[in-house]
Image: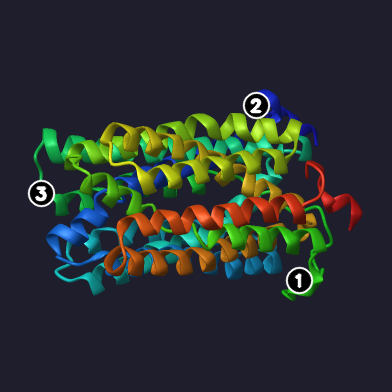
């Protein structure tokens, strides 16, 4: 314990917490150089419709989240986090250039699958290392810092894309090739992390049975799923912004501003959830989602759309950090990677449904229908969270297991 104190940073956060935040920063720079241009690359360069965009992004995001469930279980079974995480970051870094080589959407789908498989492989073990890097009272801060790094990378990445495309005027495919550089830096950061041994019996049996986890955790997964069924890929927000008249460059810049706000709110929201309770802060994020999607459904004003997209960044920053911290609270420490992995799997499965439905609505009903659908399920999610999760859900149930 003395050595841990020597490596502590401000507010009880450790060297590992900061290294993991830097890992997420570089990884997201790599990913977000591509994300805002990918739906436009698909629709304009490869000439596909909204249904294909929904399938590509739905499969990609679901792959990430489903794989997290398995990698989390494997991480708990082996009681090793770092090696699995390093493999995932390497896979993500080398996959992105294949998108630049694509002449048809199936190649993009394959590359996105590989990229998100890597992301899913690394996420739960990394999140378990984050949870272990700070004591329980500072867990919201730890996840908030990592979320800030993640979302700051998501702000910087689109700016790099704008600089490459509009200042240096390079070909759009070259952006996919150059994304390997920050991806490689993320690998170096995760290698520098010192893995801590779990101070529990290492031979404990890891049971994947859904019925073996605490009832409060199962209810939280249900509330998350009911909300997530309406939470489709952000690609539809990007396409709607572009379709309402924003230039390619301004669309990317609006997306960058969205990620900047997400980065700025991540750490404070984690800190507030430590003090005011997870449930209260999560409810705020769900309400922001409802406002954003309702606005996207009814307004055609480009300035208002830009403002709503930026507001949506507050939802993103809060939900990403506080949602995971809540999942970590609701399971015992030796099952923490599994708990976060199951949570992410539920987010992914519901997101797959949302994105496929959104793609069909986009092509066959109307663009407005995509956002009305999302707004409706956000109301269901708000009600579910209020009913299913008692109190403020601030304290960890680990004490009760």
Quadrant placement of the C terminus: bottom right
Describe residue 124's horizontal placement relative to residue 12 as left or right.
left
Task: Give the mark, 3 or 2, whose residue is nearer the N terminus.
Answer: 2
| Residue 207 seen anywhere in this rendered image of the structure | no
Describe residue 56's horizontal placement relative to residue 292 as left or right.
left
Describe residue 360's horizontal placement relative to residue 335 as left or right.
left
Instruction: Specify few, some or many for label 2: CA neighbours under 10 Å numbering under 14, 14-19, or 20 or more.
Output: few
Instruction: Specify few, some or many for label 1: CA neighbours under 10 Å numbering under 14, 14-19, or 20 or more.
Output: some
For mark 1, what is the residue? 206
The alpha-carbon separation of the residues under discs 3 and 2 comes to 43 Å
With respect to residue 69, does 275 lie above or below? above
Residue 281 location (% of width, % of height): 66, 38
Residue 9 numbered tag: 2
Q: Residue at 68% x, 31% y: name it.
A: 272
For mark 3, what is the residue? 171
The alpha-carbon separation of the residues under discs 1 and 2 comes to 33 Å
The alpha-carbon separation of the residues under discs 3 and 1 comes to 49 Å
Residue 265 location (% of width, % of height): 53, 31
Tell me the mark number nearer the camera, choosing from 3 and 2: 3
Task: Give the mark, 1 or 2, whose residue is nearer the N terminus.
Answer: 2
Q: Element at badge 1?
A: loop
């Amino acid at each position: 314990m003395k050595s841990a104190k020597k490596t502590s940073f401000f507010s009880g956060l450790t060297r590992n917490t900061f290294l993991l935040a830097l890992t997420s920063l570089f990884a997201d720079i790599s990913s977000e150089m591509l994300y805002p241009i990918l739906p436009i690359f698909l629709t304009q360069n490869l000439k596909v419709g909204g249904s294909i965009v929904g399938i590509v992004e739905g499969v990609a995001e679901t792959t990430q989240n489903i794989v997290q469930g398995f990698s989390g279980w494997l991480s708990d079974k082996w009681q090793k986090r770092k090696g699995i995480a390093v493999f995932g970051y390497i896979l993500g870094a080398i996959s992105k250039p294949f998108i630049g080589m694509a002449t048809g959407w199936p190649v993009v789908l394959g590359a996105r699958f590989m990229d998100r498989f890597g992301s899913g492989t690394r996420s739960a073990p990394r999140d378990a290392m984050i949870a272990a890097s700070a004591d329980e009272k500072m867990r919201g801060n730890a996840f908030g810092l990592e979320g800030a790094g993640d979302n700051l990378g998501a702000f910087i990445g689109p700016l790099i894309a704008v600089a490459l495309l509009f200042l240096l005027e390079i070909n759009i495919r070259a952006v996919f090739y150059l994304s390997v550089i920050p991806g490689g830096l993320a690998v170096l950061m995760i290698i520098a992390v010192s893995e801590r041994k779990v101070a529990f019996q290492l031979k404990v049996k890891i049971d994947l049975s859904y019925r073996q986890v605490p009832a409060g955790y199962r209810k939280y997964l249900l509330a998350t799923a009911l909300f997530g069924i309406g939470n489709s890929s952000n690609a539809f927000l990007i396409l709607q912004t572009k379709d309402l008249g924003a230039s390619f460059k301004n669309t990317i810049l609006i997306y960058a501003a969205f990620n900047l706000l997400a980065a700025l709110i991540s750490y404070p929201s984690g800190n507030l959830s430590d003090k005011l309770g997870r449930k209260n802060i999560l409810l705020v994020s769900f309400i922001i989602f409802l406002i954003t999607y309702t606005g996207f459904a009814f307004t055609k004003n480009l300035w208002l759309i830009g403002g709503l997209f930026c507001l949506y960044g507050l939802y993103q920053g809060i939900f990403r950090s506080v949602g995971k911290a809540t999942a970590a609270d609701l399971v015992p420490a030796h099952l923490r990677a599994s708990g976060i992995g199951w949570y992410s799997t539920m987010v992914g499965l519901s997101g797959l449904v949302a994105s496929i439905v959104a793609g069909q609505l986009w092509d066959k009903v109307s663009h407005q229908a995509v956002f009305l659908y999302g707004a409706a399920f956000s109301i269901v999610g708000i009600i579910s969270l209020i009913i299913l999760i008692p109190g403020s859900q601030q304290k960890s149930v680990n004490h009760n297991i």
